[in-house]
Image: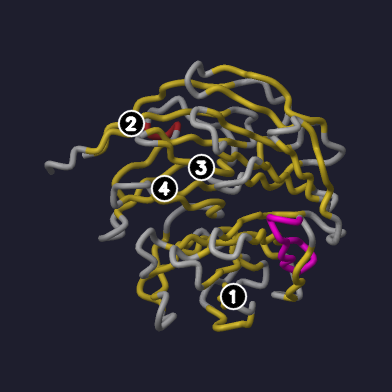
Amino acid sequence: MINVEKVAELTGHGNPIFTLELSQKPGILFTGGNDKGLVEWSLKDHAFIKVMFPVAASIYAIHCPGGYPLLFAGLRSGDVLVFSFVEQKIIRTLKHHRAPIFDIKSTNRKSELLVASEDGLVTIWSLETLEQVYAVKVSHDTIRSISISPGEKQAAFGCRDNSVKIYDIEDYTLIETLLGHTMPVFAVQYSPDGTYLLSGSRDAQVKIWDSLSFEQLKNIPAHLFAVNHIVFHSTLPYFATASMDKSIKIWGADDFKLYKIISREKGFVSHQLSVNKLAWIGNHLISVSDDKRIIIWDIQFDMAL
């Protein structure tokens, strides 16, 4: 059994919130969307702290790489702003893309930043020098999401052409193209042990792929509308999905069964519009939405059952 309780609701955004990211500093959350700035929140006090910096275009992606005092914000304009926590200011703008940035991830082993764009390119940047290292043409259309395998040997890219592309992180060569979705792939996420990959699509399906053979293991008709995001619990065998159908669902990561639906229809004072991104912090699940709200949920798992 899973018990869900709404802990807090953070308000202040005046427009839809598209993305969120936990800071390297515990207890701090960053959010961005169709507002004029990137916002910092206290998870301890459940309170607004400040607008970190203004932006000239919507924020679609935020990333805080472990081990670096930096925050990266990907904009609708194609720019990536680099904010230094040490200097407390934007120290660089990464310029290459001329179309919206939809996802940003980093690797620890190679100290590289991966940036995915609507232009079908993934650019790779050195975290040490902030210089561009590569540009890889992954698709002829938008790349919506990135997931890096736990061993940092593979990167998966969810693409608007309905495919998932798997690349070798060592030399950024294509390993495999996964086909099966009938609409654009909005979310990809490797399992914590790296044995399988989840993909979520505008077709409302979640597919499970073996990360070695690349065979499709299972298909889940997960939602009524697009699956926007997938995130695993850090220590327990569960993952959560966020959808355009305004719901959040919690699934078993070992049996792929549905264990909980968080939605207004199920009696929760939940989101009224598309749920765009999620983050786990302990047993708290954080969700952001087109309805301009950030909600913090306490998720209690009865592991005895």
Label 4: state its secondary structure: strand
Which color scheme is applied? secondary structure
Residue 197 position within the rendered picture, expressed as x and y whole percent measured from the top left:
44, 67
**Which of the two discs, 2 and 3, sits closer to the camera?**
3
Q: Provide the residue span drawn in magenta.
A: 117-129
Q: Residue at x 57, y 36 (%)?
A: 23
Kind of residue at badge 1:
Lys
Question: Which numbered disc, 1 or 4, marks the residue closer to the eye?
Answer: 1
Counting residues from the start of the chain, the first of labels 3 and 1 encountered is 1
Asked if labels 4 and 1 touch by Cβ distance under 8 angstroms, the answer is no
Task: Give the labeled residue for mark 1.
Answer: 165
Amino acid type for the residue under numbered disc 2: Val
**Earlier-in-chain disc, 1 versus 4:** 1
* Amino acid marked by disc 3: Leu
Residue identified by numbered label 4: 240
Q: On the image, numbered disc 2 is attached to which residue?
A: 4
